[in-house]
Image (cartoon, rainbow, N blue to C red):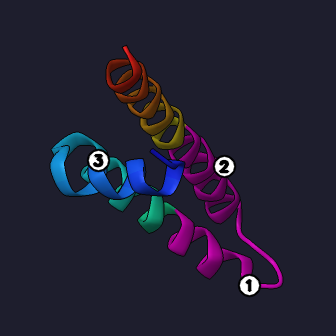
Amino acid sequence: MTQENLIERLTAENEEFRRLRSEHQEYEHELAALHVHPSLSANQHWRMSELKKLKLMAKDRMEAIIRSTRSGVTA
């Protein structure tokens, strides 16, 4: 099973994975909106830092679910 197929399957079948993927995309959209501003306030810089951390945590958890599922599929 390819990585893309596995992600599609997990998105369809796994509620936590679906939620994490949605959150990850929301963080990405908010980061993109902040990048549009030429100069950011201190609060905006803080928010950008927090969004990057949240996005990374969501991605790490999604990767853990993928690894877990892949080991269950191949075992």
Measured as percent of width and height from the top left, residue 41 is found at 71, 68
- What residue would you read off at disc 3? 10
Which amino acid, by three-letter code, is at mark 3?
A: Leu
Residue visible at 64% across and 52% down in the picture = 46
Residue at 34% over, 26% down: 73
User: Of the numbered discs in the image, which one, if any, rests on residue 37?
Assistant: 1
Q: Is residue 67 magenta?
A: no
Q: Is residue 6 left or right of residue 53?
A: left
Distance from the alpha carbon under mark 3 to that under mark 2: 28 Å
Alpha-carbon span between mark 1 and mark 3: 35 Å
| Disc 2, SS | helix
Q: Nearer the viewer, residue 49 or 60?
A: 60
Residue 31 horizontal/vertical position (percent): 61, 68
On screen, residue 46 above or below 54? below
Question: In the picture, which quadrant includes the N terminus?
Answer: top left
Residue span colored magenta: 28-56
Query: Which residue type carries mark 1?
Result: His
Alpha-carbon neighbours of circle 2 within 10 Å: few (<14), some, or many (≥20)?
few
Q: Give the residue drawn at x 52%, y 48%.
A: 3
Quadrant housing the C terminus: top left
- Residue 52 is one of the magenta-drawn residues: yes
Q: Main secondary structure of the magenta part?
A: helix
Q: Disc 2 versus disc 1: distance between alpha carbons?
A: 15 Å
Query: Can you identify the residue that label 2 sits on?
Result: 49
